[in-house]
């Protein structure tokens, strides 16, 4: 690992919030801040922002691994469809160390000198958040020497990292409880997340402790239900106590490292910045048929994107009528007929027909040709035939697939997750309150929407750091493990309600800000639909199972690393963990699976059948610090590392250290 440089500092004065601070020392150049002079209140908001950035890529890619999303990019497909893992894996690692971790010691030390105990505590919180994320993803990691300026730091095992993070949270709770020195800056001056509310920070710490202690559910010697419940009693008790990172669409400034917008939701920067990602069929099915109920979740239309279809334009080229085409999910686990025919990454991004457009398809197979023609008839399109060729006319205003491959022609049913931000839309006239995606400037001029986006991953979405609904889902799981079914049921229902209430509050905020004027998916849900859903068979009214809890949690968490963490704890769809049966039914390797050399288990009940970590970044660690990586784990460079459990994913230390031999 190369010595980490403090890249953030050069942009702090250019990009930071307005400050009344004066540089009184005539020997200090205000235009060139350094580690000794940068104020902690100027450093914290950028740490918060860049943590959201590194968390965003971790959330998206692990959500793909957990089956939330399909991606037609090679990276996403390696995690969700083919399981042929890629060797880079750099972004979460790079953004954490370069943009966040490199600032933590300086913020802590400067705050300590100034008696700014709350900023010291915040540094501890980010230490825990980031290094636990590194443990979750990579397993072994430079930790005790990682931020000490050593260009080749030694590695620590997962147990050391885990307990180090827990110790940081304990110290943070203590420091937040102290009164700052009179000369210290108020936490509210630099805090974008909680507005300086120390009580919310303390509840965040307790909630993170509960989350991290839950990871030990396989370890009978360490898992302690009562300790988790104790932490939950001090964690958020309502949505008002959630910690979220706000997302904005008010700037064209982009990040110096990767060129993405600097003020948007970090999940957007990876899941919905481009056109590659789509909702999986697994996700879609849970939103439309939870527990086999056939009941459509009122959250569905806020999560599953839509595009315009059956568009009619007036004489001036403006939309006068249309219907909404709600996306279906991309099947990667079942028969996957479309992907098997076209290839794992073959789902195509649509284009816009500014004028009537003819596309000719050569279809040699008579049955395929007949089925294709029938689809055109059902869609009301005009067509002509000549031998094996079928020529289809896409009317002006249509969103269509601009390819002569007939297999792709129906891909408009898979609406991508893309949203637009000022820095990324490429359409100068598009206002900040319109975050729809339009396939082209011509489509925008006509008013033809290519995607309404998805609740968690718009540029203006809140990035959920820790929420009340997660705490209630944890309480439901822990209570069910204890045999306290009555408490588990109350917590489970409360968690679903809390998530819907959180969504509804955001949707009402968006409506009040004008977003819903152009995007109906950003308008509030019908309260009657919410009430009906909560009383329906989609929600367990009794006889609660662990699968009931975890599938509803999976829906609520969505674009979050915690879904993948939970699935590892329950061994995905294998069952036989804790006597709870199959917790994630239907999740499995799909027909395009090609990762045999990486996932070496011979059956679903073998832990090494599943994706349990990522390989270390080749360029950053295996090339520059490979000796230390291999000294800790001699298998670090092998393909099979992808199926090796991390420390908390092992039932015993003996099992874990056995993997490292």
Image: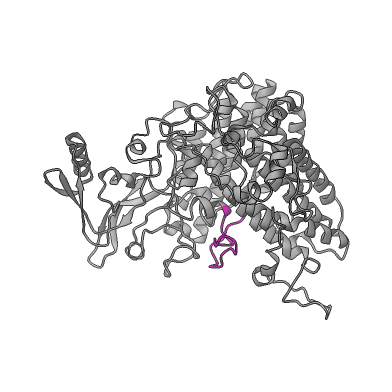
* Number of numbered discs on residues: 0
423 to the left or right of 451 = right
**In the image shown, does 649 or 3 lie closer to the viewer?**
3
Q: Position of residue 120 (x, y in %)?
A: 81, 55
Q: Which residues are magenta?
A: 246-266
324 to the left or right of 585 = left
User: Which residue corresponds to the image point at 66% horizontal and 47% vertical from the top-left?
Assistant: 242
User: Which residue corresponds to the image point at 33% horizontal and 38% vertical from the top-left?
Assistant: 338
Q: Main secondary structure of the magenta part?
A: loop
**In the image shown, does 263 or 58 lie closer to the viewer?**
58
Q: Is residue 250 magenta?
A: yes
Q: Position of residue 461 (x, y in %)?
A: 55, 53
Q: Is residue 75 magenta?
A: no
From what the image shows, is residue 346 above or below residue 397?
above
Q: Quadrant of residue 189?
A: bottom right
**In the image shown, does 177 or 101 lie closer to the viewer?**
101
Q: Quadrant of residue 260?
A: bottom right
Is residue 233 in view from this perspective?
no
From what the image shows, is residue 139 above or below residue 5?
above
User: Which residue corresponds to the image point at 32% horizontal and 37% vertical from the top-left?
Assistant: 341
User: Which residue corresponds to the image point at 61% horizontal and 40% vertical from the top-left?
Assistant: 637
């Amino acid at each position: 690992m190369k010595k980490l440089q403090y890249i953030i500092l050069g942009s702090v004065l250019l990009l930071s919030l307005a400050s009344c601070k004066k540089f009184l020392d005539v020997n200090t150049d205000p235009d060139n801040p350094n580690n000794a002079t940068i104020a902690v209140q100027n450093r914290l908001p950028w740490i918060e922002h860049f943590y959201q950035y590194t968390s965003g890529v971790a959330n998206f890619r692990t959500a793909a691994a957990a089956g939330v999303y399909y991606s037609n990019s090679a990276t996403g497909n390696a995690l969700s469809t083919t399981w042929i893992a890629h060797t880079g894996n750099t972004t979460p690692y790079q953004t954490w160390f370069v943009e966040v971790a490199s600032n933590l010691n300086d913020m802590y030390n400067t705050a300590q000198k100034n008696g700014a105990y709350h900023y010291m505590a915040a540094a501890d919180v980010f230490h825990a958040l980031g290094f636990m994320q590194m443990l979750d993803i990579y397993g072994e990691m430079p930790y005790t020497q990682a931020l000490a300026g050593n260009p080749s730091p030694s590695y620590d095992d997962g147990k050391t990292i885990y307990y180090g993070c827990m110790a940081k949270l304990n110290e943070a709770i203590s420091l937040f409880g102290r009164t700052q020195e009179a000369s210290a800056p108020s936490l509210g001056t630099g805090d974008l997340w909680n507005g300086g509310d120390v009580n919310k920070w303390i509840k965040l710490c307790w909630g993170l402790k509960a989350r991290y202690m839950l990871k030990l559910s396989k370890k009978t010697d360490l898992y302690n239900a009562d300790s988790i419940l104790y932490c939950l009693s001090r964690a958020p008790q309502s949505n008002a106590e959630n910690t979220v990172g706000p997302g904005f669409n008010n700037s064209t400034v982009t990040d110096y490292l990767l060129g993405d917008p600097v003020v948007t939701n970090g999940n957007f920067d990876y899941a919905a910045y481009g056109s590659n990602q789509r909702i999986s069929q697994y996700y879609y099915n849970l939103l439309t048929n939870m527990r086999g109920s056939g009941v459509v979740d009122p959250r569905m239309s806020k999560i599953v994107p839509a595009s315009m279809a059956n568009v009619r334009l007036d004489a001036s080229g403006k939309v006068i009528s249309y219907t909404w085409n709600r996306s279906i999910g991309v099947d990667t686990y079942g028969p996957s007929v479309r992907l098997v025919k076209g290839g794992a990454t073959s789902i195509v991004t649509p284009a816009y027909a500014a004028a009537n457009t003819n596309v000719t398809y050569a279809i040699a197979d008579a049955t395929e040709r007949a089925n294709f023609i029938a689809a055109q008839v059902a869609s009301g399109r005009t067509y002509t035939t000549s031998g094996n060729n079928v020529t289809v006319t896409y009317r002006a205003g249509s969103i269509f697939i601009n390819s002569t491959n007939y297999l792709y022609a129906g891909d408009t049913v898979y609406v991508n997750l893309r949203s637009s931000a000022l820095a990324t839309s490429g359409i100068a006239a598009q206002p900040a309150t319109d975050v729809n995606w339009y396939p082209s400037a011509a489509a925008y001029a006509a008013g033809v929407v290519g995607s309404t986006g998805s609740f968690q991953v718009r540029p203006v979405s809140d990035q959920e750091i820790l929420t009340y609904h997660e705490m209630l889902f944890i309480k439901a799981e822990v209570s069910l493990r204890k045999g306290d079914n009555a408490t588990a049921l109350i917590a489970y229902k409360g968690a679903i309600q809390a998530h819907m209430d959180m969504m509804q509050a955001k949707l009402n905020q968006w409506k009040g800000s004008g977003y819903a004027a152009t995007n109906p998916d950003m308008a509030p849900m019908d309260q009657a639909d919410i009430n009906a859903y909560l009383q329906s068979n989609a929600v367990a009214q009794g006889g609660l199972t662990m699968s009931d809890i975890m599938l509803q949690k999976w829906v609520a968490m969505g674009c979050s690393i915690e879904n993948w963490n939970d699935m590892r704890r329950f061994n995905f769809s294998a069952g036989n963990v804790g006597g709870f049966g199959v917790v994630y039914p239907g999740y499995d390797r799909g027909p395009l699976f090609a990762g045999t050399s990486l996932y070496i288990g011979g059956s679903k009940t073998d832990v090494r059948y599943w994706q349990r970590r990522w390989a270390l970044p080749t360029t950053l660690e295996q090339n520059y610090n490979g000796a230390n990586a291999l000294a800790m784990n001699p298998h670090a460079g092998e393909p099979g590392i992808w199926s090796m459990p991390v420390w908390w994913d092992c039932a015993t230390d003996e099992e874990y250290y056995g993997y490292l031999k």
